[in-house]
């Protein structure tokens, strides 16, 4: 789909930014080339040896095509050695293939979905590679969260602005870090930052369920550390699903089983355990109707189950990778759900990016601090929006925000 559309729009001489973007997105290998060469210089043969791409001649053709339209810049040439008299060209990508809001608005909805899923697939590859290499959780202060939100239109706009501003600010930090790295002998840190803010489907969530205030935690929950309680949530993926849904609306065990599958007794058992651990609290009871004389209990989450970088640093190293992968699986489910429901790209002003960076230690610390700050600011916008919604008749919007900043494995031969 994307490749066919790209050929139609590109023609023989792409000139607009949108048509130049089509040159990159016409083949996944080209997007990979631009992403990798934004981090370091490479020759076609180096890229082929590290990442493949069909054949060396095909990769070389991709390099030349990208250089022709300004996506790559020739930075040096080398001859001799094992080159048998040939000259090897080394390139660098001066910028990433980023689709800004104005350009995004020009794309047909079908193309938006294609690009969005391709972006997420590539982000997933970065996560998988970092987890397998052990770099994802190597630094205790990494950030990896996704958060469901109930907001009004004002809150949604402010959340998007927070993520947009963070994205732009990270490139300033990248420029400063590169300057510092050139002046020092400090080893570079290869980092991936993923940012997204998009609309999620409402499903059967009604207004009254969305707007209930979050209850206070039970006293017994204060006897244990937050990270120990989090560990119990991550012991099974269903626990995290329960917390996620009940952060948005009240539910009973039978409702949860009906919406997401499974047996009611098993759901009830998990609900009771989460109540004992202080993650859920009973907010209502109903009788009559289909309950046949029984009592149906409804629960609400006390707070979302999330790891910020501070609480993550307290998690034992041996279990971090398991937790991180579970977080990612839930995130992937959330993204797929929004794409299937056609809410992910329903509005032009959603944000969805992943970006490779090369930082020094100071740059890394400042990136993490910036991502953490946006995380807490997003939660504050969530709180304010729910207060406004409780006083108005405005329709509530379900949004999802994910923020990720982690160390990627050092590319082979990177300097």
Image (tube, rainbow, N blue to C red):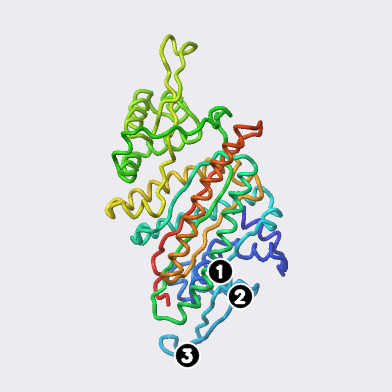
| Residue pictured at 62% horizontal, 47% vertical | 345
Q: Residues within 10 Å of mark 3 (few under 14, many from 20)?
A: few
| Residue pictured at 41% horizontal, 42% vertical | 305
Rendered view: 153 above or below 129? above
Q: Tell me the CA gap for discs 3 and 2.
A: 23 Å
Quadrant housing residue 359? bottom left
Query: What residue does disc 2 label?
Result: 67
Query: What residue does disc 1 label?
Result: 172
Q: Horizontal placement of 253 versus 29: left or right?
A: left
Of all residues, the one furthest to the top in this rendering is 293
In depth, the one of 215 and 144 nearer the eye is 215
Of callouts 1 and 3, the N-terminal one = 3
Q: Residues within 10 Å of mark 2 (few under 14, many from 20)?
A: some
| Quadrant of the snapshot with the C terminus | bottom left
Q: Nearer the viewer, mark 3 or mark 2?
A: 2
Q: Tell me the CA gap for discs 1 and 2.
A: 25 Å
Q: Secondary structure at mark 3?
A: loop
Q: Nearer the viewer, mark 1 or mark 3?
A: 1
Q: Secondary structure at mark 2?
A: helix
Residue 224 lies, in percent from the top left, at: 29, 41
Quadrant housing residue 406? bottom left
Query: What residue does disc 3 label?
Result: 85
Residue 290 lies, in percent from the top left, at: 48, 13
């Amino acid at each position: 789909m994307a490749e066919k559309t790209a050929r139609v729009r590109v023609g023989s001489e792409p000139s607009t930014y949108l048509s130049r973007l089509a040159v990159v997105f016409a083949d996944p290998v080209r997007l990979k080339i631009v992403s990798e060469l934004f981090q370091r210089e490479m020759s076609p043969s180096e890229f082929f040896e590290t990442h493949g791409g069909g054949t060396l001649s095909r990769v070389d053709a991709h390099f030349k095509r990208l250089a022709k339209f300004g996506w790559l810049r020739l930075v040096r040439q080398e001859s001799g050695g094992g080159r048998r008299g040939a000259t090897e060209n080394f390139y660098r990508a001066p910028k990433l293939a980023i689709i800004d809001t104005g350009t995004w608005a020009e794309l047909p909805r079908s193309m938006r979905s294609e690009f969005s899923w391709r972006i997420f697939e590539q982000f997933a590859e970065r996560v998988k590679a970092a987890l397998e290499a052990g770099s994802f959780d190597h630094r205790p202060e990494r950030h990896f969260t996704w958060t469901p939100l109930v907001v009004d239109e004002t809150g949604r706009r402010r959340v998007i602005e927070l993520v947009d501003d963070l994205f732009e600010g990270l490139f300033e930090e990248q420029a400063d870090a590169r300057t510092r790295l050139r002046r020092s002998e400090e080893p570079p840190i290869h980092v991936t930052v993923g940012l997204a803010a998009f609309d999620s489907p409402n499903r059967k969530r009604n207004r009254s369920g969305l707007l209930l205030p979050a209850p206070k935690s039970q006293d017994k929950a204060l006897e244990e550390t937050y990270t120990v309680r989090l560990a119990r949530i991550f012991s099974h993926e269903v626990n995290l699903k329960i917390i996620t849904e009940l952060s948005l609306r009240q539910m009973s065990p039978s409702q949860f089983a009906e919406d997401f599958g499974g047996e009611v007794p098993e759901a009830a058992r998990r609900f009771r355990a989460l109540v004992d651990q202080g993650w859920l609290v009973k907010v209502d009871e109903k009788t009559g109707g289909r309950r046949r004389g029984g009592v149906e209990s409804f629960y609400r989450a006390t707070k979302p189950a999330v790891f910020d970088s501070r609480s993550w640093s307290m998690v034992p190293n041996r279990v971090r990778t398991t937790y991180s992968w579970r977080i990612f699986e839930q995130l992937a489910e959330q993204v797929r759900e929004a794409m299937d429901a056609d809410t992910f790209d329903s509005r032009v002003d959603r944000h969805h990016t992943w970006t490779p960076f090369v930082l020094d230690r100071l740059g890394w610390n400042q990136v993490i601090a910036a991502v953490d700050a946006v995380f807490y600011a997003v939660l504050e916008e969530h709180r304010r929006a729910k207060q406004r919604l409780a006083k108005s008749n405005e329709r509530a919007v379900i949004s999802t925000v994910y923020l990720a900043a982690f160390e990627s494995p050092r590319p082979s031969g990177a300097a």
